[in-house]
Amino acid sequence: MLVFSEEKYLFSHFMKIVCSSDPDIIMGWDIQGGSLGFLAERASHLGIGLLNNISRTPSEIKIAAGDLDIPEKGNFDNLIPEQSNTDPVILEDAIIEDEWGRTHASGVHVGGRIVLNIWRLMRGEVKLNMYTIEAVAEAVLRRKIPSFRHKINRTSELARVFGIDFFSVLSRGSQYRVESMLLRLAHTQNYLAISPGSQQVASQPAMECLPLVMEPESGFYADPVVVLDFQSLYPSMIIAYNLCFSTCLGKVAPSKLLDLVVACLVQSFADSIVQCGRSTLEKAISFVNAHDKWKAKVIYGDTDSLFVLLKGRTVKESFQIGNEIASAITAMNPKPVTLKMEKVYHPCFLLTKKRYIPTVQGALHLSQPAAIVATKAMRADPRAEPCYVERIPYVVIHGEPGARLIDMVVDPLELLAMDSPFRLNDLYLHQQTNNPRLCSGYLGLVGADLNQWFIEMPRPAREAFAKRPFSAPNPHRTRIDYYYLSKHCILCGELVQASARLCNQCLQKGAAAATAVIGRTSKLEREMQHLAAICRHCGGGDWVMESGVKCTSLACSVFYERRKVQKELQSLSSAAADEGFYPKCMVEWF
């Protein structure tokens, strides 16, 4: 293993390896987003033309392989000549303007070498429902490979960035992280933060500034309504106006009033941020209403967003005016305050505060369930953008009555999480997989109506009692509809009181009930051990028994069976422990 003090030395060594081995073919699984393409984009930010330097074609900025000698130990300085990050040759080296190559080939070009995108080749050769590397390996190589979430590494890196302990990354919120970074900066300036007691916190004055939430002009609007939103309003206020505990004056006594009006005449840091955001929104509303060219009217405003009515305008004109409004208001505010044009509602019902029924124009991609899941993933990781024509797995869960499809689409891993409150929407699954030709064609010849059969089938409003979570819900992750579910006996399934695990009849059996619960728990434990042995054969090593199975491959059928048994075992063992039948099982070991 080689350790480098800077990234550019790492790229230097990588280029030396490629140039010395001189391969004819360079291949990667997702070579655009997670392989050579990612390295090329990262290198371009450092002023390094990676693709050009590993090519076989001569160039003015190409670095010869002989100039990249890297010692096994010692200093790695002066290995790469200093280059400007704004060099157009270097920047174009990573960003290839080749639409056909991006959608049908590798999209990455290295002179004199063939670059192959294995994912795209496999998609053309093998017909699968899912084209992850785990699914393709099982189909082509007949070999299972594990998939890991890298949670330990990711959490460790976040702990280093924020300067907090490992567990606090998982258990604490964003305010704790921000304060930790501020404290690290304060310590470099020889400042210490106070630690107020509970009495001091309780005695501090209440907030005096509130966000602006306008009373909307309720009604039906047949004309376009443009929705504009300030991007990260409160963080932008802190940066734009240099808001800090040291720059806020706090309350000023009447006898010491300044001659000039102080902008941040508020009692605390939080009030300063809220008041600046409110003032920015009020100025934007006044500016839009007073503009003669647009002839627009703000009918609703909420904290950081504006609803602008454009009477007599078309949808196309509304998009143009919306962009003009966003640009004008962004220009009149200090950086980085930015107003973004979000969407156009046409038509729109505006009822009360935070209650409106729109028809969105210009956002048709939201109707695709897979696009919703991909968008959520990209918000968490910008590099999680799916490849061209890539299939995105998703599931539809049960939502509240009247919920839209986009509100019920989640990633499969969210449904399979141990503390997940979601339930699979089997009705939607039937409607999507039902074959009309089978229902009305072949079965119609014998007078059978499959749809009518399905309509007349009894539908219980609850899950089977064995699948229901008996353990205490996670207060941070559970939705409110969890508390409206009925509870059932863990043995016979009869209704029980909210705090009970067994019905009265099973409780009277005593030892027989305890034996039945222990027997079920033992059976589930044996199933978990059997599934863990399969996973151990796939991943190798004894880490499975020591730390539990961490593989989350959606292409593996064992993963789904393992999660089902794991949830049942966790719920049943928790219920048995509460009744005093059996000690809690260490489910996480399996």
Image (cartoon, grey):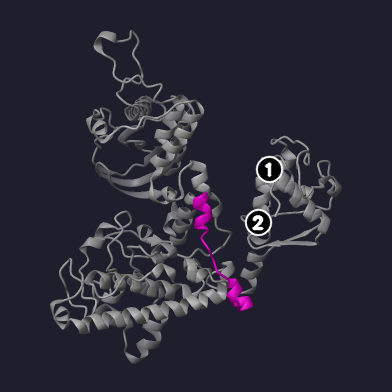
Vertical side of 158 occupied by 147: above or below: below
Query: Which secondary structure, mark 1?
Result: loop
Q: Position of residue 116 (x, y in %)?
A: 71, 62
Which residues fall within the magenta stretch?
Answer: 135-156
Q: Is residue 118 magenta?
A: no
Q: Nearer the viewer, mark 2 or mark 1?
A: 1
Q: Nearer the viewer, residue 574 or 408?
A: 574
Vertical side of 505 occupied by 428: above or below: above
The answer to whether residue 588 is left or right of residue 534 is left
Q: Is residue 147 magenta?
A: yes
Q: Residues within 10 Å of mark 1 (few under 14, many from 20)?
A: few
Residue of label 1: 5
**How many numbered tags mark residues here?**
2
Answer with the quarter of the image where residue 287 lies: top left
Residue of label 2: 35
Q: Residue at x 65, y 56 (%)?
A: 35
Answer with the quarter of the image where residue 293 lies: top left
Q: Nearer the viewer, residue 64 or 300?
A: 64
Q: CA distance from mark 2 to mark 1?
A: 22 Å
Q: Does residue 438 appear anywhere in the picture?
A: yes
Q: Position of residue 381 (x, y in %)?
A: 51, 51
Name the quadrant of the N terminus: bottom right
Amino acid type at circle 1 is Ser
Query: Which secondary structure, mark 2?
Result: loop
Q: Residue at x 35, y 65 (%)?
A: 397
Vertical side of 187 occupied by 486: above or below: below
Q: Position of residue 514 (x, y in %)?
A: 23, 80
Whether label 2 touches label 1, CB < 8 Å:
no
Amino acid type at circle 2 is Ser
